[in-house]
Amino acid sequence: MAQLSQALKQATPVIAARGEGVNLYDEDGRRYLDFTAGIGVTSTGHCHPRVVAAAQEQVAKLIHGQYTTVMHRPLLTLVERLGEVLPERLDRVFFANSGSEAVEAALRLARQATGRPNVIVFHGGFHGRTVATASMTTSNTRYSAGFSPLMSGVHVAPFPNPTHYGWPVEQATDFALKELDFILQTLTQPNETAAFLVEPVLGEGGYVPGNTAFFTGLRERADRHGIQLILDEVQTGWGRTGKFWAQEHFGVTPDILVTAKGIGSGFPLSGIAAPAALMDKVWPGSQGGTYGANAVACAAAIATLDVIQDEKLVDNAAQRGEQLLERLRSTADGYDAVHDVRGLGLLVGNEFRSANGEPDGSTAAAVQQEAARRGLLLLTCGPSGEVVRFIPALVVNEKEVDEAAELWAASVDAVLAAGAR
């Protein structure tokens, strides 16, 4: 009898039967508040009626129109609509299926456009599980262990993570930029460096936001040396951080933007965007994929964009994010074990530390599991699994945030009070 591989471990025991908004229901009809959103994918909530209707209508017309063979209207319409939300200058797009594929497409473009072999990534970044993207992922060794040799030409620079270093953010930023300069002096010459690849907010690395000084420094160095700045907005894009793109918080525009997850409200779709002059340097035929820009996924993405704009979900993410941060920080104030609560918009992490200041993944996992038992679904992240993250759908309302905060407080109380006895 066939069984699921143990390659993936489920974060909760829930068998989901149906979903609506931020709610999931199991096969017995029990309701759970889903503050995972499929790892930030179901941006408009589970089964938003407008997304469902768009997908149903498209399924009846054309399911798969392979876009190196034929064009289809949902693809062309989506490209046109993306022009309304993409950063200025980024006027050419390429579609794939997953975040990993899109990151690889960005890397391929940067290397082909510059003729340079190397890439600098930043400590704590997560970019995927394929050989190339795992080679550029530094959030945890589990993503790259066991299938060496990895891709060559990757160098790692510090990310300005103040909680990791125990420094003020200004000091962490100065250190990160100085070390980046040192890497360009000692490991990879600028004229051999194709790109900087970085997340605006570390995702799997612990939900650590960057800052304006850091990204200004990256942009200046990229411009000075002809290096392509690639921003991986797979998890942070499409309104997640209270801006349509997280880069807007820091006043920086990349040369190449990577997007996925929230773009299709659950349908597989990803892509990259770049200026025409840069995208024109890609070698013909070097990019592609059978299912990229699937007609149903494109129709769902158009509906997703309509919902985000019509229901003002970017503003809602900002407002509900402030509410969530306030409630979670109120809970954290009662316990030294909750070392930090941080985030942007509806991308919020709670970091747990032990009494001696070490990352405490076991307590984070215990609280996450207790929350699931109480009906609140969450995920962990961080190098030691020490961060519990909140990533609800952008449609979450004030009442649902309050309910989640109360369940979280009860879960923290149950675990930490028990540990104190």
Image (tube, rainbow, N blue to C red):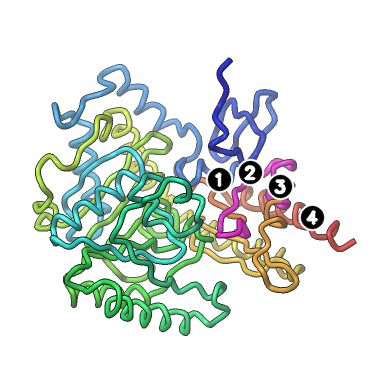
Task: Give yes or no for contact between labels 3 and 4 (Cβ–Cβ under 8 Å).
Answer: no
Residue placed at 40% from the left, 51% from the top?
134
Quarter of the image for residue 66 reads top left
**Residue 213 visible at all:** no
Residue 377 included in the magenta stretch of the image: yes
| 340 and 360: which is toward the camera | 360
Task: Provide the residue designation for mark 3.
Answer: 371
Task: Give yes or no for contact between labels 2 and 3 (Cβ–Cβ under 8 Å).
Answer: yes
Return the disc, 3 or 4, that comes first in the chain's sequence.
3
Q: Position of residue 99 (x, y in %)?
A: 36, 46
Q: CA distance from mark 1 to mark 3?
A: 12 Å
Tell me the number on the disc at residue 377.
2
Q: CA distance from mark 2 to mark 1?
A: 6 Å
| 321 and 36: which is toward the camera | 36
Q: CA distance from mark 2 to mark 3?
A: 7 Å
Task: Provide the residue designation for mark 1.
Answer: 36
Disc nearest the viewer among 1 and 4 = 4
Instruction: Say if 124 sits above or below 134 in the image.
Output: below
Tell me the number on the disc at residue 331.
none
